[in-house]
Image (cartoon, rainbow, N blue to C red):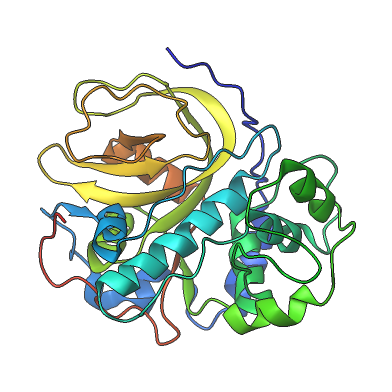
């Protein structure tokens, strides 16, 4: 059985920050921003991560290491999945590189007085809308082609960051983003083609049952993202950032390394905790998937 050797305390609960972000948005709640999607995911199985296969892109096996960078890792995973869904849907022509975790970790912590590791999800998403993202490429001032815990820690403390990268990142801001407040909204968002990121104190067993479901058995301060829904046994696929940390013997849907299914009631509790978000297009949440899809 795998043992957990990763930081479980990288998500910072910041209710005031969440309220401030919501107050800055014209339509902060997903239910109000996408009323046409209400009920869209009912009875569907949609596996967004299968877009990697359709787009002929290899999904990165992420191991955040011994640093509380889970918020940034989940955010980067969400951005990458959004890109491959767009390729699979014919909206984007190419996938240049995965997204830098180190950069997101930095901007999510900028302007805060945090001691130790971590960041809130809302802060990361809000900053990506203002400051953008960086692709995992080699730049004149730094090589970002491989994830570095050391660099993540330095940049998270706002040390040794090449300021010229800010101008590059601003070309890659995210569009619409909204707070998601229930399992039903998570389900409907994924069914329409939009993965969801969440930070919570819910922790799960590293052993899954024969359907791939894990039980809520412990507490983490941790961020992950949801990338699929299923209707045979209703549930949501949760993608972690600890590489092969868990045991899923029966991968019925070819689930990615480190992922696990959770029950709707667990998803609902995590979403209602408050720090749960979806990223849309610059023009909102047009439906990207028009039928039940199992790629």
Asked if residue 16 lies left or right of residue 86, the reply is right
**In terms of depth relative to the viewer, which is nearer, 268 or 4?**
4
Q: Residue furthest top?
A: 1
Q: Residue furthest right?
A: 159
The quarter of the picture where residue 267 lies is top left
Residue depicted at 66% across the width and 60% down the height:
104
The image position of residue 261, as x and y in percent, is 30, 36
The image position of residue 209, as x and y in percent, is 25, 20
The image position of residue 243, as x and y in percent, is 49, 34
Q: Is residue 218 above or below residue 55?
A: above
Asked if one can make out residue 192 in the rendered structure from this viewpoint, the answer is yes
The image position of residue 26, as x and y in percent, is 52, 83
- Quarter of the N terminus within the rendering: top left
- Quarter of the C terminus within the rendering: bottom left
Residue depicted at 47% across the width and 39% down the height:
240
Q: Is residue 262 above or below residue 184?
A: above
Asked if residue 60 lies left or right of residue 190, the reply is right
The quarter of the picture where residue 64 lies is top right
Residue depicted at 46% across the width and 49% down the height:
60
Asked if one can make out residue 275 in the rendered structure from this viewpoint, the answer is no
């Amino acid at each position: 059985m795998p043992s957990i050797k990763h930081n479980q305390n990288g998500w910072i609960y910041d209710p005031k920050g969440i309220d401030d972000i919501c107050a800055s948005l014209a339509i902060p709640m997903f239910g109000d921003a996408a009323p046409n999607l209400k009920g869209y995911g009912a009875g569907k199985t949609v596996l967004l991560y299968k877009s990697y296969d359709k787009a002929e892109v290899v999904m990165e096996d992420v191991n955040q290491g011994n640093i509380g960078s889970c918020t940034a890792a989940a955010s980067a995973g969400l951005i990458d999945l959004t890109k491959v869904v767009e390729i699979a849907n014919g909206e984007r022509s190419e996938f240049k590189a995965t997204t830098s975790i180190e950069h997101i970790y930095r901007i999510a912590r900028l302007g805060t007085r945090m001691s130790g590791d971590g960041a809130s999800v809302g802060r990361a998403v809000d900053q990506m809308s203002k400051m953008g993202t960086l692709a995992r490429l080699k730049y004149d001032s730094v090589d970002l082609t491989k994830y570095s815990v050391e660099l993540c820690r330095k940049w998270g403390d706002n040390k040794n960051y090449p300021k010229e990268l800010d101008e590059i990142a601003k070309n890659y801001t995210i569009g619409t983003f909204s707070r998601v407040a229930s399992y039903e909204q998570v389900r409907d968002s994924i069914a329409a083609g939009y993965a969801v990121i969440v930070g919570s104190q819910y922790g799960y067993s590293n052993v899954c049952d024969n359907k791939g479901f894990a039980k809520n058995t412990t507490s983490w301060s941790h961020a992950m993202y949801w990338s699929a829904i299923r209707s045979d046994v209703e549930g949501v696929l949760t993608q972690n950032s600890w590489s092969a940390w868990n045991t899923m013997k029966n991968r019925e849907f070819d689930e990615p390394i480190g992922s696990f299914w959770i029950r709707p009631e667990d998803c609902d509790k995590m979403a209602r905790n408050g720090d749960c978000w979806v990223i849309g297009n610059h023009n909102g949440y047009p439906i990207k998937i028009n039928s039940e899809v199992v790629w």
